[in-house]
Amino acid sequence: MRFIPGPIIIPRKSRKEKPEREKKTKPAKKEKKLVYVLIKVKPDQLISEKAREVEEVFKGKTFNRVVNPDGYTLLMNAQNLFSKSSRVYVVELTDEMNRWFYLVPSEERIKFKNKDKYMVFLIKKDSALEEIANKIVEGKLTKKSTFELVLTAIEVALGLLTFVAGYLAFENVIDISQLSNIVAFVLFFIFALQSIKKGYRKRDWED
């Protein structure tokens, strides 16, 4: 029986698949927080003595200290420290004559005892930091500007308009479609007012 050789199969080298490059995802940018803490020195205590107590709280952390600063100095220090941390504490010591400010960058929450005022500012716009710094230096953190008061008055008036429209609809003076249009207009207007308000939110607690 005659042997007839079959076809010769030459194995091909498999192409190595190029490993997929891992897509580098940028970490979500944290919201900037400025935490303002006011500590009043007791009449029988020197501000330097109280300062030593406060500095013990900052042990192991870097901080800047400025005495009786203007708004610009406070702003420049805060901006510099925000490049190191998304949260900056501004701690004010005062004996009614002098004002010592400690600026501390810290991602971790710092707890204070016997504080006289505590405010957290969630900064949405970098331009808002200047306003906050000036208000701190001028001691006007709790006071609303004329612009804010006007916006608040308009929002209250719009709320009353919605209430009156609801009452008129209940009394069949206007129909439901008109009420819906009024409510939509009020909601749109309030949203528009909120968008032009200050570039930060203020609250009295911290996450």
Image (spheres, rainbow, N blue to C red):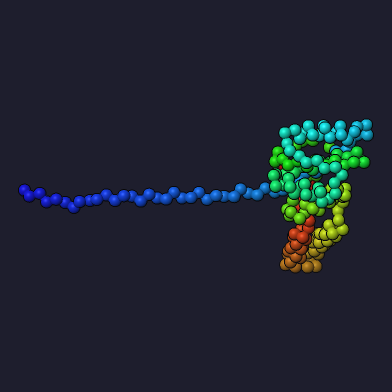
Residue 127: tell me if it is visible: yes
Residue 204: tell me if it is visible: no
Q: Residue at x 85, y 42 (%)?
A: 67
- Quadrant where the C terminus sits is top right
Considering only vertical position in the picture, is 78 above or below 56? Answer: below
Q: Is residue 91 left or right of residue 106?
A: right
State the image coordinates of residue 127 (x, y, percent, origin top left): 76, 55
Q: How many marks?
A: 0
Q: Between residues 172 and 195, which one lies in front from this camera angle?
A: 195
Q: Is residue 33 left or right of residue 42?
A: left
State the image coordinates of residue 143 (x, y, percent, origin top left): 87, 51
Q: Residue at x 70, y 41 (%)?
A: 107
Q: Which corner quadrant of the image does residue 145 belong to?
A: bottom right
Q: Between residues 6 and 101, which one lies in front from this camera angle?
A: 101
Q: Is residue 31 left or right of residue 14?
A: right
Q: Residue at x 88, y 48 (%)?
A: 139
State the image coordinates of residue 191 (x, y, percent, origin top left): 74, 60
Q: Which corner quadrant of the image does residue 48 belong to?
A: top right
State the image coordinates of residue 117 (x, y, percent, origin top left): 84, 41
Q: Residue at x 85, y 40 (%)?
A: 100
Q: Which corner quadrant of the image does residue 49 belong to?
A: top right
